[in-house]
């Protein structure tokens, strides 16, 4: 039996060898798909399993066949023998050109509305109140627990900060996109992206604090610019430094709006803390959600909510 990590960073399975062979033949999995075999602790690419070598070779050969002539019947996009569904197991075909993407995003020259971000986050909280509060609370208590570990709390928080932040942001992002989301999504960072997320958290944390020590202004600038970098890592499958550079370039272009949104978020956190911490479980999710709304408006070509993803057929 095998478990599979989809391109949406969700874990699927357990699935039998026959099911995986079918997914390969349907084009829903390829050599880069991350798989964990029963009894093993690590994740490996599907191409490293000899039992799937022949099926992968056949799939590659089939992909090289020219498309049917114009007018010929073709299957609907995403359709498979098991029913319609996205290719959630398919690995990215090519790395993202972050310089070109940054130029494209900046060229849109959109106006980031701070009040609109907060309003959309508040609406999201109203529609999914208990789910959002529960997910935010789980992330909050885990982060606090890591930070209060005796002797190693600070380095542990530095190492896992980006991982936990990425998972929490991804949870909000899925809700905003109209995709299925659960409390377990706050731990999505503990998957294939964990290495870049750890590096992202360490580098941004150390350089941010170094900026504060030299002068407060550089520290504020870097902290605001890099706050959304972990979400870029897990959402767009970027390495840590391209994600940080992409975040810096785009956020710098919208600096005052993002700085204003960061100030609003800090005020929401302070207000919730002063109200005996109870209100924090309302103001905290609003602040977090507002930052993810800003992410959608800055880093997605189209921020229109997507239709819910189709279910994946598993045994």
Image (cartoon, helix red, strand yellow):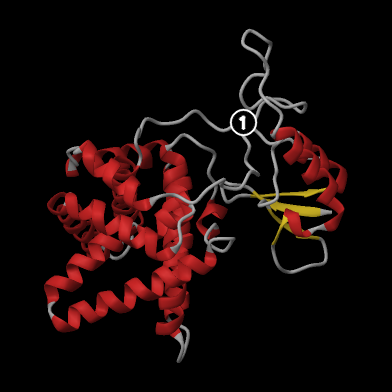
Q: Where is residue 50, by image quadrant?
A: bottom right
Q: Residue furthest top?
A: 71
Q: Position of residue 127 (x, y in %)?
A: 40, 36
Residue 181, visible in the rendered structure: yes
Q: Position of residue 112 (x, y in %)?
A: 19, 42
Image point (82%, 66%), residue name: 39
Q: Position of residue 58 (x, y in %)?
A: 80, 40
* Image: 202 above or below 281: below
* Image: 160 above or below 257: below
- Residue annotated with mark 1: 310
Q: Is residue 22 left or right of residue 69?
A: right
**Towards the viewer: 114 or 138:** 114
Q: Residue furthest bottom?
A: 151
Image point (61%, 49%), residue name: 10
Q: Position of residue 51 (x, y in %)?
A: 87, 53
Q: Is residue 200 left or right of residue 18?
A: left
**Towards the viewer: 195 or 145:** 195
Image point (30%, 62%), residue name: 226
Q: Where is residue 116, by image quadrant?
A: top left
**Towards the viewer: 70 or 120:** 70
Give the SS element for disc 1.
loop
Q: Is residue 276 left or right of residue 241?
A: left
| Residue count near mark 1 (Cα–Cα under 10 Å), binned few <14, some 14–19, many ≥20 | some
Question: In which quadrant will I find the N terminus?
Answer: bottom right
Residue 118, visible in the rendered structure: no
**Towards the viewer: 255 or 242:** 242
Question: In which quadrant will I find the C terminus?
Answer: top right
Total marks shown come to: 1
């Amino acid at each position: 039996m095998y478990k599979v990590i989809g391109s949406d960073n969700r874990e699927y399975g357990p699935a039998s060898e026959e099911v995986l062979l079918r997914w390969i033949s349907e084009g829903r999995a390829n050599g880069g798909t991350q798989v964990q075999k029963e009894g093993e602790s690590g994740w490996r690419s599907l191409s490293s399993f000899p039992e799937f070598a022949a099926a992968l070779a056949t799939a590659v050969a089939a992909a090289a066949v020219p498309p049917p002539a114009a007018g010929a019947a073709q299957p609907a996009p995403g359709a498979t023998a098991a029913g319609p569904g996205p290719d959630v197991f398919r690995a990215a075909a090519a790395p993202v050109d972050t310089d070109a993407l940054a130029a494209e995003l900046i060229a849109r020259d959109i106006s980031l509305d701070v009040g609109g971000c907060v309003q959309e986050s508040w609406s999201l909280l109203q529609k999914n109140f208990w789910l959002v509060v529960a997910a935010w609370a789980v992330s909050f208590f885990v982060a606090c627990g890591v930070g209060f570990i005796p002797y190693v709390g600070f380095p542990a928080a530095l190492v896992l900060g980006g991982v936990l932040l990425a998972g929490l942001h991804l949870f909000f992002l899925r809700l905003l996109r109209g995709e299925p989301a659960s409390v377990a999504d706050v731990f999505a960072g503990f998957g294939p992206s964990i290495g870049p997320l750890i590096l992202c958290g360490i580098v941004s944390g150390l350089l941010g604090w170094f900026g504060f020590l030299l002068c407060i202004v550089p520290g504020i600038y870097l902290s605001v610019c890099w706050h959304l970098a972990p979400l870029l890592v897990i959402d767009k499958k970027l390495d840590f430094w391209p994600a940080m550079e992409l975040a810096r370039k785009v956020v710098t272009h919208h600096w005052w709006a993002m700085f204003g949104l960061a100030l609003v978020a800090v005020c929401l956190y302070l207000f919730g803390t002063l109200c005996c911490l109870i209100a924090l479980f309302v103001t905290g999710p609003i602040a977090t959600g507002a930052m993810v709304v800003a992410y959608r408006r800055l880093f997605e070509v189209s921020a229109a909510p997507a239709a819910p993803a189709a279910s994946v057929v598993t045994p």
